[in-house]
Amino acid sequence: MHPSSVSDFKGINVLVIGDLMLDTYYWGIVNRISPEAPVPIVSVNKIERRLGGAGNVISNLKSLEALPFIASVIGTDSTSSHIKKLIEEANIKTEYILFSNNRVSTEKIRVINETKHIVRCDIENDTDISHDEEVALLNGIKKCLDTHPIKVIVLQDYNKGVLTENLILSIIQIASEKNIPITVDPKKKNFFAYKNVFLFKPNLKEVKEALDIDINPTDKHSLLHAANILFERLNCENVFITLSEHGAFYMNKAGEHQIIPAHARKIVDVSGAGDTVISVATLCVANKIPIHDIAILSNLAGGIVCEEPGVACLSLAQLNSYIIP
């Protein structure tokens, strides 16, 4: 892949649709065990809040110097206030976010002892948004597409209820009419609703669960069998399966396929790596980069962010430093 195509990430208009979350970190040091129960006491010295879920995708896109827009539904609680503030601080529009009195905003609370992740607490509502919320969100999406020159759409699904089956089908139809490619980071619930998209990017665990088959991540024939089933069920243009420490596998509609080995790295935290992968892959799609190069670059990007504790974002400068000698 030529480095100039990465520089072309700058200024690309991307619409991200999906589940917004807040990642809250309590950083501290463990010096003793609690007298109340055999659990460590963390002396907290820093509290940090970051955008999570679809929010981490827009953070990655912003860090890669693209121009992201976000469409989602969150609550009207203190968590949603933090989410809105963080998005505004990143100079990203919040006008396509629907604030609902009927929902609890998703927050993932992580307690970290120096760099070791001790515990995570999730506060969430994973029921589907209502029909009225679907209509309001879709109207906002249409407005965004009519107002801004969106080059690509990301559907970022964490099964928290924003991407309902009806909404997914409507978005795919609208994008098809406007000739806008869609990339998808799916979850189990609506896994097979994402038909006719440009890039379908599940991880290995999600594919195993969806197809209910065993897959050997080091065996090309095993991966090829799974990919063929996905093509038959989804009629997508490209399948891109992340394989964790085994790298990634891609296959396109023409049948071209390959396993991309993982880069040897010191893994600190895999949280959010998939968000980085879909962000880089999406910008590559916008630039019409071949799937082979998309897989190589996205796989590299996902590995880079695993070297940092917590959910991390990848900058364009970081990415360039790895691909430019």
Image (cartoon, rainbow, N blue to C red):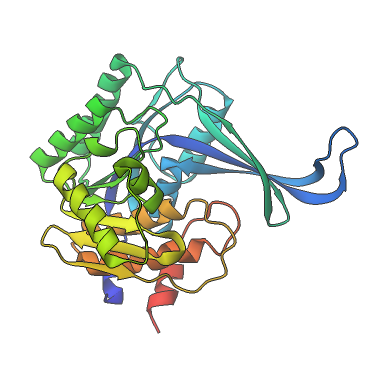
Q: Residue 279 location in percent, x, y?
A: 35, 54
Can residue 155 be seen by looking at this rendering?
A: no
In the visual, does 123 lie left or right of 62?
A: right
Q: Residue 150 location in percent, x, y?
A: 22, 46
Which residue corresponds to the image point at 73% horizontal and 56% vertical from the top-left? 114
Which residue corresponds to the image point at 47% horizontal and 23% vertical from the top-left? 75
* 202 vs 172, nearest the viewer: 202
In the visual, does 155 lie left or right of 289?
A: right
Q: Quadrant of the C terminus?
A: bottom left
When asked about the image quadrant of residue 168, the answer is: top left
Q: State whether residue 138 is above or below residue 57.
A: above
Which residue corresponds to the image point at 18% horizontal and 62% vertical from the top-left? 288
Can residue 292 be seen by looking at this rendering?
A: yes
Q: Residue 299 location in percent, x, y?
A: 38, 65
Q: Quadrant of the N terminus?
A: bottom left
Q: Residue furthest right?
A: 35
Which residue corresponds to the image point at 84% horizontal and 35% vertical from the top-left? 37
Across the whole image, how many numbered discs are drawn on residues?
Answer: 0
* 148 vs 140, nearest the viewer: 140
Q: Residue furthest bottom?
A: 325
* 289 vs 115, nearest the viewer: 115
Q: State whether residue 248 is above or below residue 76.
A: below
Q: Residue 153 location in percent, x, y?
A: 25, 45
In the visual, does 231 lie left or right of 39?
A: left
Q: State whether residue 287 is above or below residue 172.
A: below
